[in-house]
Amino acid sequence: MSVAPVVAPPVAEAPVVTTGKEPRHFTLGSLPLHVALILLTLIWIVPTLGLLVSSFRPGFLVSRTGWWTAFAPPFQFTLQNYSDVLQSNNLFASFLNSLTIAIPASVIPIAIAAFAAYAFSWMRFPFRNALFLVMVGLLAVPLQVTLIPVLSMFTALHLNGTFIGIWLAHTGYGLPFAIYLLRNFFGALPNDLFESASIDGAGPVTMFFRLVLPLSVPALASLGIFQFLWTWNDLLVALVYLGGDPAVAPMTVTVANLVGSLGQSYELLTAAAFVSMALPLVVFLAMQRYFVRGMTAGAVKG
Amino acid sequence: MDAERLTYLVAAVVGVPVVLVLYILFTDWLIRRLPPGQQPKIRPWVWVGPALLLVGGFLIYPGIATAWISLLTSDGKSFVGLANFGQVLSDHSVLIAIRNNLLWLVFYTGLVLTFGLVLAVLADRVPYEGPVKSLIFMPMAVSFVAAGLIWSFMYQFQPALPGVHQTGTLNAVWVNLLHQQPIAWTIDQRVNNFALIFAAVWVWTGFAMVITSAALKGIPPELTEAARVDGATELQVFFRITVPLLAPTLTVIGTTLVIFALKAFDIIYVMTNGLYNTDVMARRMYAEMFTSQNYARSAAIAMLLLLAVIPVLAFNLRRFQFQESIR
């Protein structure tokens, strides 16, 4: 796996040239540095490691001994926990529900935001700056202030507990950040590009589809990852608008419920948690570069 | 995945963007029929229209409606002014939640910034920077539900009885290596709020580290080298040069963290559900909404949350206007 991308800051070119800094070698003096760094890194990975190991241990052992004893003989591992949670705890259905929620809830806001961001960066209209300031302000607004009226609205429209309802909600909540990030990117495209296209007779529609979108693939990719991870990992919005209906519950809701119902059966809970983490981790590892770039570009999202 | 679900998914993923493109193409066809002077006046509104409609419907209107609901009786029939706020603010459980949010605000923000800064600076000096940063950053991909579960498992407690092993990692270290009595980390009120906060710190430190690290690489090496040549120790370089130069970046990260600290919900919901004096405003609001079904009080708590983020909101707006002025 390539890990280099994380290192790359948003202005990617600069850091490779660490001018004036002589390459550092392992010396006795830097030993505390290595010890501190490795210790901190260990603290950061041990919780996930413990989770992963426990999910493969038989239940009678998980409840009696620590996960680290699994590394000493007799080595007792099992896949039983995974087949148990996937079959009997509604987890497979929830996995599909999470997909059904997160994919459209990522695509729809990006599509809507792209047009709006283009207008905000390259068209002139009254209240343009004021409206954009509203978007920036909304980045900090806790979505708690919207829950009650939106829930009443959904109840009136029979959108409670439906995927359409939650797609709409995630779209509304995701738009300010999506517009903010895309406008930063679109706005930074060189002016000459638009002038010469305009001289060639291209209208806004042509410029948007032929010029702006192809140039913005990295920005669209980071936004896509963000929105996917947010909607996949969201608990609150799903709890409020999908109610307690297990037929539509995403992974987060199901796993949170399992914590209540399975109590101390950590061999099952850890397996369930790992199933819920697997896809975002894969997406994250595969697209780390875009993720980091988008994050450093729009660090004000609330 | 059944056929109906699949149709549904495809319709949303493909259908919505297609409809949106058709909408733009069709309206543009109409707009081009207008006199040339009118075209640039109409077009922008067509392009921002769907976004404004959704933002209005899901954020602006509900925000105003919540403010209104917070001024009514719980049945929504009569106006009571600020009575709900008075009631909420004299409720012991809400005061506990406010205290806990303050703990989150100070310790969560402080610890994430500190760990992020220290890790960025340390990792900058070793050849294995990439792998270290990837590992620290990884929890960012995990849901708070999973993180809460991971840390509940870390904090597991077994009574100190002969023949009983500590299965939680923290208690195993605490009891076996440090020879202390085991602690029920999520229940014991001396430590439980900090235990929950640390779970969130674990998730977000990577965020602070990556952004701080990017800013750190932007500091010209001549600055720190010159100080070293002048005889400054590494600590002096860190506190007198690196930290002041990173201050603007740390402030920006801090604002994001403050908002998160005020809205904290998932971790508490999963790990303690607000019991043992670990409740926070966002969970209190949820409980008032669903458990007590008192929308007026719930709305009042939501407005208090909004009030609390207003300084951050104002800061963000000013920073944005400053950035625009130098673009």
Image (cartoon, helix red, strand yellow):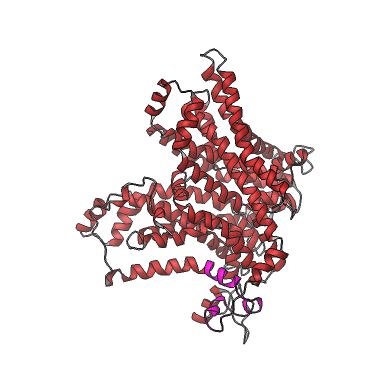
Task: Describe residue A213's horizontal placement relative to residue A168 as left or right.
Answer: left
Compared to residue A206, the image places residue A166 above or below, namely below
Q: Nearer the viewer, residue B287 or A227?
A: A227
Residue A272 location in percent, x, y?
A: 64, 64
Give the residue drawn at x 41%, y 33%.
A189
Main SS, magenta region, reads: helix
In the figure, A17 relative to A50: above or below?
Answer: above
Residue closest to the eye, B77 or A98: A98
Location of the N terminus of chain A (image quadrant): bottom left
Residue occupying the far front of the picture: B3
- Give the residue displayed 58% in from the left and 65% down from the top: B150
| For residue B312, above or below residue A1 | above
Position of A27 compared to A210: left or right?
Answer: left
Residue B116 visible at all: yes
- Specify the farthest residue to the top: B35
Q: Is residue A65 magenta?
A: yes
- Residue B147: x percent and y percent? 57, 61
Residue A82 at x, y percent in the picture: 64, 67
Q: Is residue A62 magenta?
A: yes
Image-based side of B324 in relation to B90, left or right = left
Residue at 65% from the left image edge and 70% from the top image edge: A81
Chain part drawn in magenta: A47-75
Residue plotted at (74% across, 53% down)? A247
Q: Total number of numbered labels?
A: 0
Q: Position of residue A284 (x, y in %)?
A: 51, 54
Task: Examine the image and state in which quarter residue B240 appears.
Answer: bottom left
Residue B85: in sight, yes or no? no
Q: Quadrant of residue B128?
A: bottom left
Front residue of A230 and A5: A5
